[in-house]
Image (tube, helix red, strand yellow):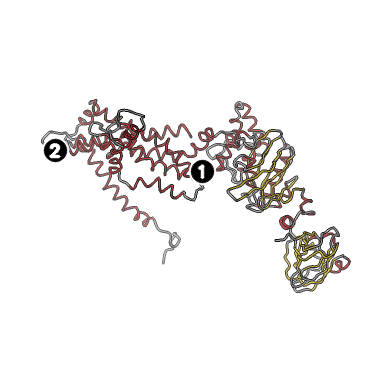
Amino acid sequence: MASLTLDALTKRYGDNVVVKSVSLDIRDGEFLVLLGPSGCGKTTTLRMIAGFVPPSGGSMRIGDKDITTLPPWKRNAGLVFQSYALFPHMTVNENVGFGLDMRKVDRAEITSRVAEALRLVRLEGYGERYPRQLSGGQQQRVALARALVIRPDVLLLDEPLSNLDAKLRLEVRLEIRALQQQLGLTTVMVTHDQEEALTMADRLVVMSDGAVRQVGTQSDLYERPADLFVADFVGRSTMISGAVTAPGAFRSDGGLSLSCQPSAAAGPATIALRPERLTLGAAAQGLANHATGMVTFVSYLGALLDVHVRLNDTDHVVVQIPNRSDGHVPAVGDTIEVGWPASACLVFPREAA
Amino acid sequence: MATVSSRPVGEPGNLTAAGLLVPATIFVAIGLLVPIAILFRYSLNAFVPGQLMVDALTIDNYVKFFTDPFYLQVLWRTVRVAIACTVFCLLFGFPLAYVLARTQSPYKNLLVMAIVLPLFVGNAVRAAGWMVAFGSKGFVNSTLMAMGVISQPIEIMYTELAVVIGIIAVNLPFMVLTLQSVIEGIDRNVEEAAFSLGAPPMTMATRVLFPLALPGILAGVILTFILAMNAYATPVLLGGPKFQTMGPLVFSTFAQQNNWPFGGAVSFILMTATLILTVASSLLIRRRYA
C-alpha cells in the first residue's frame, strides 16, 4: 500500500485539453472518487494513472516512486474495468492467478493466494469455471479478486458497477467498500453516479471540463459547494438568480427580497437552495425568508414528496417534505406559504460570461 | 374439422427451409462431387500412349507418382513453398491486421481498401508485373546496382524466392482480412487488463491476444495454405518451366501429355496432401494456444 500523488497532471489532444493540471494527494488507504459528467476528464485521469494514456504534462508518484513514464506492466496498479475484461479463454483460477504468474510467484503460493482472493470475494468453489459460466455480479467479483491478488499499490476502479442491475449494485458497492477498508487499499474510483460516489468515498473530487472543481468530503460538497456547478451536480438545488445588493441582502430577478449570509459579496449572483432545507405552511412564517406561491407540481417519491412551488413569474423552488399520512398533502393549484432560513441560501457570484 | 397448425403464423416450415437448400445442394453435387468422383475413377484407369484412356482398375498411377523421384520432388517443392508462404503471410499479416483492427483513424476504410485493392488485379497480371521487377535488368536489380549494393544482377526470376514472394503478395490480403475481423471482436480492455497485471507486450500477445485470435489465425492459415498449394499462374510465370509445382503439373499432365489417368492421380494426391496438412496445421496451432 502506498500514497498516490498527482502533480499538475495534464492531457492535451491537439488544442483540446481534456485534463487540465489536476493535482491530488491520495493518502495511504484512502478511497477517493472522481465524480463528474461524461467527458469531464475523469476516465482519462484514471487511464493516465494506470499508464494507458501518456500525460502531456505533470507527474505522478506512488509513494516516493515517480511513475509518470513507467509502462502499465511495471506500475503495480490493480485495475477493474466497467466491462470486467476477464480473459475468456482462462478459468477463474487462471484469471486470478495471471498477475501472480507474471510476477514469477511459485505454483504453490499462486494456488493458495488465488484461493484466498476468491474466498475474499465469496467465490470459493468457482475456480474451475470459465467467465462465460458466471453471472455479471460474479464476473465483477472475479475481476476484483484478480486486481486484489497482486497486492497492488493502488486499486483503480473504472465505473465498476455500471453493468450491474440496480439491486446488485447496492450490494456490491458495500462489499467493495468493506474489502477496501479491510485491506487498507489506496483506491481511486471513477463514476458518474453521485449516489455511488457518496456512499463509497472517503473523499470526492468533482471534475468538469477537465478541471477539478472541488475536493472534499461528502458534507463539504453538499453543504459547502465551491461553486454553482458543484451545487448543481452534487445533490439537487433550485436556483434563484438575482443580485446581492447589500451585505446579507439579495434581490431576485423576480423581485423577491431575500436575506442571506452577510459574507456574500455584492454584485450579480445566484442562490442555490437544497430542497430539504425549505419548509411549507404555517411553520414557514417564522423564518428569515418566506414567500407565498402556487403549487405547480407534486411528485410522490414514497417516503418523501417533492413539491414544486412558483413564487412569481421567474422564481420557483422545489421543496422536499416527508410524506406523513396524517399530514396535509399539498395539491396542484394550492396557494401555499414557503420559508427557509438565511443559512439555507448558498450564494454564488455570477461569473461574467 | 380444421386442424390447428402447431406452427406460429409467419414461421417458415421445414419444407420451405429444405426448398431453399436445394439449389445449392444440387450445384455442389453436380459441380463438385460428381467431377471428383469421375476424376477418381479416371485415376484408376490405365494409360496407353496413342489411346486416351483404357478402362481398368489399377493403382499404377499412384505407384508411379510415389516411386518417381521427379514427382516426389514436385510435391515436396509445392508443400515447401506453401508452408513458407503461409508462415510469412501470418508473420506479415498479423501486425497489419492488428493495426487495422485497432486504429481510431478516420481513414480506416481507406486502409482496408488499400489492403483489398491488389485483389482487383488478376494473378496473371500481377505475376507479369513481378516479372518486370525481378528480371536481370528489372527494377530490383537496376536499383540495387545503381545504389552499389551489388555489382552483378542477382538471379530472382525463375527461382523459388520469386514464386514465394509472388504467392505471398497474392495471399496476404486474405490473411489480413480474416485476422482483422477476429481481432476487432477482442475487447481492447482485455489487453489492458493483461498489461495492468504485469504482462509486457510480448507476454500479453502470447498469453492473451493470440489465444483469443486463434479462430482467425486458423481460418487465415487454412485459407492461404490451400491457395498456395493450388497456385497456378504465379508458379508458371515466376517459376518458369523448370520450377514445377503441383498445380501446373496437373494441367500439363492433362493438356500436354493427354495422360488423363495420371492427371487424375496427381489431382487426388494434391487434394489429399492439402487436406492432411491443413488438418495437421490446425491441430498444431490449437494445441499450442488453446
Type of the residue with mark 2: Leu
Residue in view at x 61 percent, y 31 percent = A100
Choose between A322 and B81: the one closer to the eye.
B81
Mark 2 secondary-structure assignment? loop
Marks 1 and 2 sit apart, C-alpha to C-alpha, by: 56 Å
Residue A174, x across and y down, in percent: 71, 45
* Residue A1 visible at all: no
Q: Find disc 2 in the rendering and name its residue.
A: B52
The subunit carrying tag 2 is B
Choose between B40 and B162: the one closer to the eye.
B162
Q: How many discs mark residues in the rendered view?
A: 2
Mark 1 secondary-structure assignment? loop
Q: Nearer the viewer, mark 1 or mark 2?
A: 1
* Residue A328 visible at all: yes
Residue in view at x 42 percent, y 32 percent = B284
The numbered mark at residue B186 is: 1
